[in-house]
Amino acid sequence: MRTLALFALIAALILGTGFVQSWNSALIILNMGLVSAIMALGVNLQWGLAGLFNVGVMGFVALGGLAVVLTSVAPVPEAWEAGGWRVAAAIVLALAAIAVAVLAWKRLPRKTRGWAVAAIAVVGFFVYRALLDPAVSAIEAVDPAATGFLGGLGLPVLLAWPVGGLLAAGVAWVIGKTALGLRSDYLAIATLGIAEIILAVLKNEDWLTRGVKNVIGLPRPVPYEIDLQGDPGFVETAAGLGLDPTTASTIYVKLGYSVLFAVVLVALLVLAQLALNSPWGRMMRAVRDNEEAAEAMGKDVTARHLQIFILGSALCGIAGAMMTTLDGQLTPSSYQPLRYTFLIWVMVIVGGSGNNLGAVLGGFLIWFLWVQVEPMGQWLMGAITAGMADGSALKAHLLGSVQHMRLLTMGVILLLVLRFAPRGLLPER
Amino acid sequence: MDFLNALVVLANFVFIPAFAYGSQLALGALGVTLIYGILRFSNFAHGDTMAIGTMFTILVTWGLQALGVSFGPLPTALLAIPFGIVLTALLVLGTDRLVYRFYREQKAKPVILVIVSMGVMFIYNGLTRLIIGPGDQNFADGERFLVSARDFKAMTGLDEGLALKSTQAITVVVAILVVALLFWFLNHTRTGKSMRAYSDNEDLALLSGINPERVVMVTWIIVAALAVVAGTLYGLDKSFKPFTYFQILLPIFASAIVGGLGSPIGAIAGGFIIAFSEVGITYAWKKVLEYMLPESLEPSGLVQLMSTDYKFAVSFVILIIVLLFRPTGLFKGKSV
């Protein structure tokens, strides 16, 4: 009942935006709300179901973005010729060095293994750099204004979504292997760090992502507005509905995304619900509530944690790929931890941790507020400053800093919910 | 001569900057570690506490400058630090009363407090941006160099110059003073001893009549002071930008964990370990090697192990190595 009422509220808010502002902004909010809901679902899986504290959501979201570039962009043959294979060789060599180091650590006698691993690491690093550096400069020299990177595989962009999930899952496996089983705060710091590193890689490895030059014009799974406007059939239908072709085409495209995203969200939500109510879900909650007891019952706590950490991160990766597809470009400098990690946490806490529907609800609600706080703040500041003399420095400053109201509002909301409704809007059953 | 030149280059580009940066990290990590020891949670809002404290200091500095007050060759901000500390202490005490105390009384799990501190982080961050804006603020005044590169060359006749920025010297001096004061306080005053007792064993401390609320209050005041000093020194040395104060959270946490969470000495050691590795690994060693090696062996590249953009990776990797092989840190910290 409560669930229905709250989701009706969300629908009303979005429809209200449509009536008051414009249908285009309503659809923009809806689309990003769908994506946010998937991210929140991923975090809820980790936090709500297993009590894992992941503050590296941004990194997994960014990996999803990278997946879009790697899958859907057409390959750049000149760059591959210039140094692509050498880069590939360098990476294989680095992986081999790591594998040998791990093996040496496990196999060699205690006394010598530290030195052996150090030697393998140092030698491996220098050989890797010697192989990589010239290849990278060769690739980046290939028409730097337009390409200067290896490109992707040129596959359909929809494939990038599962690939984004896989990429995120792979990285999550590595982090989970090292940081899980330690204390909960340590996992938090480790994920915080890995997110910054992933972002640093995206910003600086131009041969992979073009770095801060951004990859623009990514392929789209929906038609282009301009093609629709040129299609007489579409213009006629739009006219029949009483819309001008420009508005109709933008709405049509956004609706297309909404349908695609909604399909993904519903599918994932159904899976998450089935998992939650399965014996596996009960086991996860048992592990969360009392690790010692679960361990005594023969459950492998660390392995279960690793499993769910990977699953949750994969969801974030999928959502990240969807978001980059929606934007049509990969802009590494646009990833901000407050927006892509901590805001998702606010969504989960406000929605209700441990409840999948709650996470989805939180995703929509908080995203709506995040977007709409700015116009509200504008109005509020306008009201506050109305009495002040025009041109006063304070008035200009207050009006100019409205955009920062967002962070403040989110903090207040988070604290209020934690204090007065610690189980969220839709508590776990 | 070549050897001396190499030493000067090393001091100029590695040793001095790393020492100053390490002092700033150590002060930040001390704040994190104290909160962890007494209040028993990882305070994600610490970076933004530093930011907001520095902002208070900057505002007071501007006020003092407008009044025509100056500190001679030293930056005016040093005069403003006490005001910044008072304001920040009031802010964090208010936050504790309004936010944290409730969870303390509930005996909430540490991870809940971490999430609460995320909310506080949002609020501090929003306040800082609301008041002073997200942009860069430069508030350093006074003498810029203690020793400038040109004077140094003229003085010694070496090819390489050694520049010692006054902000770097001030950072180190102030950091040493603050740390000395803190350790004297923790080891020799009644309140300091009760803080350590509370950190070691809460129940025993309570039984022996220590007032926990007083310990917590004193802790917050000290943490506010450390955060303001660390933030102001960092801002003087580099520049003040709210977002960099959020990012510095990672090396600060790395320092505190590497040293052992809850251990003040560990926090200082961790700060310097992180700072020296970060600077050492991202520095291009070409020049030093040119002086040190015979001509035939001179390197052709920059001999930079990693580009400066990956400096966060350095603190992260050190953190992971320590966590894997010595989870309680170098100086045995707590592991709850």
Image (spheres, coloured by chain):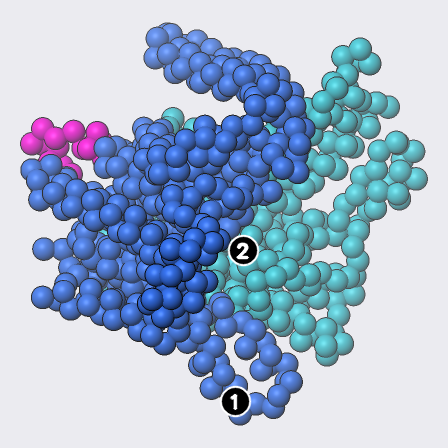
Chain colours: A blue, B cyan
Q: Which of the numbered marks, if any, corresponds to residue B109? A: none
Quarter occupied by the N terminus of chain A: bottom left
Residue B224 % position (x, y): 48, 62
Residue holding disc 2:
B243
Instruction: Determine whether, in the image, residue A414 is placed left or right of residue A145.
Output: left
Report the chain holding disc 2.
B
Q: Which residues are magenta?
A: A289-305
Q: Label 1 to label 2, Cα distance in Å?
A: 31 Å
Question: Residue sitting at 25 percent across and 71 percent down?
Answer: A12
**In-front residue for pair B106/B179:** B106
Q: Helix or strand or loop: what does disc 1 sit on?
A: loop
Residue holding disc 1:
A386
Residue A108 % position (x, y): 38, 7
Report whether residue A350 is seen: yes
* Amino acid type, label 1: Ala
Q: What secondary structure is the magenta-colored segment mainly?
A: helix
